[in-house]
Amino acid sequence: MSITELPPTTVSPAYERLSAARKAEVVRELSNVLGERYVLHSPYDLTLYEYDASIDRGKPDIVVLPATTQDVAEIVKIAGRYHVPIVPRGAGTGLSGGAIPIYGGIVIVFTRMNRILEVDVDNLRAVVQPGLVNLHLSVALGPQGFYYVPDPSSQRSCTIGGNVGENAGGPHTLIYGVTTNHVLGLEVVTPEGEIVEVGGTTYDTPGYDLTGLLIGSEGTLCIATKIIVRIVPLPEAVKTMIAVFDEMDDASNTVTEIIASGVIPAAIEMMDRMILQAVEADTHAGYPMNAAAVLLMETEGLKESVAEQIEQIVSICRKHHARVVRIAVDEAERQLLWAGRKNAFGAVGRISPEFYVQDGVVPRTKLPIVLRRVSEICEHYGLKVGNVFHAGDGNLHPLILFDSQIPGEVERVRQAGREILEVCAQAGGTITGEHGVGLEKQAEMALIFSDTDLRIMQQVRTAWNPRQLFNPGKLFPLPGRCADIKQL
């Protein structure tokens, strides 16, 4: 079907902005719990929290910075009494608008809840607070010979709590999986202000897998206040290489054959010419600026197995016309190659005032045709696009360049993004791999789920969050909103 009314899967909550008098009451109660210093409510202070890394905006009425789980529970109870929506926020690095308070209300920021509470290397686990920066955990574990695997590109600033909310991935998703594969249990606060523990410190807990349910729920079901994560030993050997191609199709076909051969690298990333040029100007990572595409690949494990994998990968790259295959000679070069990839989004800021990132996933075998369609769509709308993505699992991240000062450009960018997601769905993929649905992809949920699917998921949300106070207006299509849908 086309141009159809989306199913009424979400009750559109009626939230009125707090009046000055009512806001003063809420601020007073919150200040009694947290202290005045940790309750922000002036227009100047609130400006920082009206956006994340997406292109949406929405100003909160109040921002709070709790220090303990009990603080969070009290905040939730106060919000409930005044019927004020709550939006949990990590570092604001999310790309789908999940932390945007579209109805105002209270934003909970976990800057003060940023500690590693426990490390148990014998049982391969650690307990952390949600405001802990992702990379800080691996830095702390490194001297003991361990690390935390999930590594989003924003890992130097994103928080583990935010990663849990979005079920974040990263380059090493290919072999190790996403956040849900590395979380054993959670302490959470419910919309009633109750403190609940789900999962635990063991690998198999009886009963419903509530941990799996809550990870990736984007703050719509609960607020995580403590996270039990799985840690792993550092590998004996790690090798990183780049393969340089003069055709995007050759690079894409190389990825498919590497995986089909039975070799599963720890990571396979792809960057096209536009991204390579931006990264080199910014990071000087040693990437060729005249290539059509580069594959950044990494293998790890025992020295002997790594050497065998490298030999196989190099052979496959050459079979598919790789111009050059270069293996990092030392840790410094390896880190530089990865710095280029991790800084790719920021580097694009050198060539465009703004950019919009999509997050579709397609089968690896469909990469060549989908990448061509992405280029065609953006060309149709007069937009430039660069590609940098997790090629090993087909998780595309087209970066569409734009300038919001040009009339109509934001609308063209959004339409191009919608059409790209439709192409991903038609190719047998999905609309998000790791960035979440948030505000950005609500309508597109109907591309991959039926009316019944959406209603059942909404019933779960209603069971946990009956008053719709936790991150309202996210994840599911809103009633009355129209979208161009193709039933696949």
Image: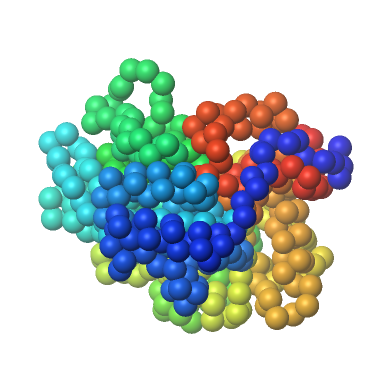
The quadrant holding residue 2 is top right
Examine the rendered structure and indicate whether residue 139 appears above or below residue 277.
above
Examine the rendered structure and indicate whether residue 193 appears above or below residue 404.
above
Residue 298: image location, x then y, percent? 38, 53
Does residue 46 appear in the picture of this structure?
yes
Residue 23: image location, x then y, percent? 49, 61
Coloring basis for residues: rainbow
The quadrant holding residue 37 is bottom left
113 left or right of 8 in image: left
394 left or right of 421 in image: left
Instruction: Kindly identify the residue that appears in the image at 38 percent across and 60 percent down.
Output: 28
Instruction: Kindly identify the residue that appears in the image at 28 percent across and 46 percent down.
Output: 69
Instruction: Kindly identify the residue that appears in the image at 49 percent across and 32 percent down.
Output: 464
Quadrant of the drawing holding the C terminus: top right
- State the residue lying farthest toward the top: 206
Does residue 279 appear in the picture of this structure?
no
240 left or right of 260 in image: left
Examine the rendered structure and indicate whether residue 60 appears above or below residue 7.
below
171 left or right of 198 in image: right
Residue in front for this viewpoint, 386 or 22: 22
Residue in front for this viewpoint, 77 or 342: 77
Instruction: Kindly identify the residue that appears in the image at 16 percent across and 45 percent down.
Output: 118
Residue 362: image location, x then y, percent? 63, 44
